[in-house]
Amino acid sequence: MRWVVLGVAGSKRTRGLQDACERLGRPAPVLVAWRDWLRDPACLAAALSAPCVFKVEPPGDDAEVHHALVVRGAERLGRPVPPAAEPGELAGTDLWFAGFSDTMDRLAATLAQAPGARPVNPPADILGMTDKLECQLRLQGAGVPVPRLLGAVTDHASFVARLDAAGLDRGWLKARFGSSAAGVVAFRRNRRGQVSATTSAHLVDGGGGAPRLFNVKRVRSYHRPDEVRRVMDLVAAQGAYAEAWVPKPRAGAGHFDLRLLALRGVPAHRVARIGERTVTNLHLDSRRADPADLLDVPEIRLAEDTVRRAAAVFGGSGVIGFDLVVSGPRAHVLEANAFGDLLPGLRWGGRDAWDAALEAA
Amino acid sequence: MTISERTERFAGLQVIDWKPGEPVVHQAGQVHRLSMDYDDKDTMAERLTAYLDAADTAKLQALVIGAWGEAHDEGPEPFLEVLIERAAELPALKALFVGDMTYEECEISWIIQGDYGPLLAAFTGLEVLRIRGSTSLELPAFRHDALRELAIECGGLPREIGEALASSTLPKLEALELWLGTDDYGFDGDVDLVGRVVAALRGPALKTLGLRDAEIADDVAKWLAGEPWVAGLQKLDLSLGTLGDAGAEALCGSAHVARVPVVDLSHHYISPALQERLRAAVPGVVLDDAQAPDDEDRYVAVGE
């Protein structure tokens, strides 16, 4: 079957799929670039007119597309258009999501007219997973264990109020829209009045203006109360929620969680991510490990069962990356990621994630 | 347990987590760690009591205490008291680690420690004591005739602890490891005080000296370079600190340091040229984890 990809030319994801097609002797995937589709919607409709498997890759690798989505979102919400974000800047993710929603709605309409195109992940599922609060609520509603949700928050003060109400002295502030660890803050406080915020979101002095937030590939902790407040205010202003802290199991001086890929609902590729700074995403200095070296067989089975149940919530989706904490009698789902298959070099059943996705589709 | 990635060691033993309800089986070469998750409801004093009730206490040789629930707000006294009360039942206890916590469990500078005077008085046979955290840590000037290894890991060693150690006597001490840290996290001593501590505790048995995680690493290195007794060490550990070219230059020129079989300087700010000279001058040097400062600032490995 021919593959059509809505993606970004030259990105790691696109190249990975192209290489896999070549390896497996399949026709090269047809790439429709996000930027081309936004300018000319007809080009995608044309590509989808013949039978094909259709995969949406995230638009984030293209700064121009990112800003176009922010502009579209601002129009949709009737809000002023902010200046284009700088590379790595965490700004306007709520506007970005509104724009992204608009494109997913249009994509659904296009697919409705293209009966031969079979999406790997349907637009509605992609949206449902990209709104992380919505996603956790859906999983929770389906009985899948997730960390206790403390609700949506709009700033540092409302986050702290949520912790107070729950009687907690630590918790996570998570950006509602986005992916990977962007806009995730681990907050702690003690009775001596000390606070800390551990995050890959760094405050950068905007040069006379207000400080701005940048996502950096290094986790750091803020301890000055004014900085903690500012980081959390900037994250929360873009839409965020508070979540209880689920302890991750320990490995040496660090702790780990799992990324487990579900292919057509079946648990497949998996990797443990050991981090010494609480945030364990692989691109943030976390170390990869084989889950079989960290967890015993019943624990692995528990993780797999949880992934099966979680994947069924998005039953139309062929590729979902789940982040889980396996600890004691539960495996908690931290996140479901519709684009969670960027796992270069990771093999399961002898195949990397691209090869496996091609064969599973 | 065959789970290789999770194996940790203390006092030469493999650390195994013990959870309430499990039997206590003492295996040769293993030590149990009692550690509470953030959301556990019992107290460490209760957990320790349950552990000791289930253990063959007469044979218990080593113990690791990890996170004690709210270590960021509550000190260890309640469970240290349990140990002290039952000291007579624990004649074989030789090695104790209090505060084996990760950053995820509690930032090292937030760990509330306590007074170790009563514990040291009650366990006259204790040979290895490792303490993590220096906030609210109290240590009297003490004499202990069995202690072979003493380690205090922290982001900043307070002057009072240094002064107490400088007035203490540990005739059997083989390994001393102090994390000096930074003034941001409570270090308010200086190399003169460090010198007095080492002078007080350096007996004929001392083979391993660790002055780690130090923002005064250069000063410490310059001082050590001129001390003839350094040549008798088996290991000198100045890792985790901010050692730069000034300290490295001094170490290069020291015939005493050159004779130490292992000189661990990992996590350092030494220039490539001086690293080369060090490798030539000090055969036992370890220079892992070179730091590349993006500005003039240098940071210890463990602070907050």
Image (cartoon, coloured by chain):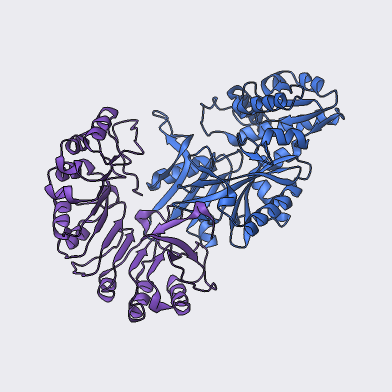
Chain colours: A blue, B purple
Q: Where is residue B95? Give x, y as percent.
A: 34, 66
Q: Is residue A66 above or below residue A137?
A: above
Measured as percent of width and height from the top left, residue B173 is found at 22, 62
Identify the residue shown where x is 72% and y is 22%. A31
In this rendering, the answer to whether A155 lies above or below B124 is above
Residue at 51% x, 27% y is A87
Measured from the top left, where is residue A267 in percent x and y?
A: 70, 47
Q: Quadrant of the N terminus of chain A?
A: top right
Residue B123, picture quadrant: bottom left
User: What residue do we see at 34% from left, 32% from top?
Assistant: B292
Look at the image and tell me whether residue A148 can be seen: yes
Figure quadrant of residue A356:
top right
Q: Does B181 sit left or right of A32 as displayed?
A: left
Q: Nearer the viewer, residue A201 or A263?
A: A263
Q: Is residue A75 left or right of residue B242?
A: right
Exactly how many numbered labels are in the figure? Answer: 0
Q: Nearer the viewer, residue A50 or A35?
A: A50
Relative to A347, say whether A166 is above or below: below
Quadrant in which the C terminus of chain A is drawn: top right
Q: Position of residue B289 (x, y in %)?
A: 36, 38
Residue A151 appears in view: no
> Is residue A48 shown left or right of residue A38?
right
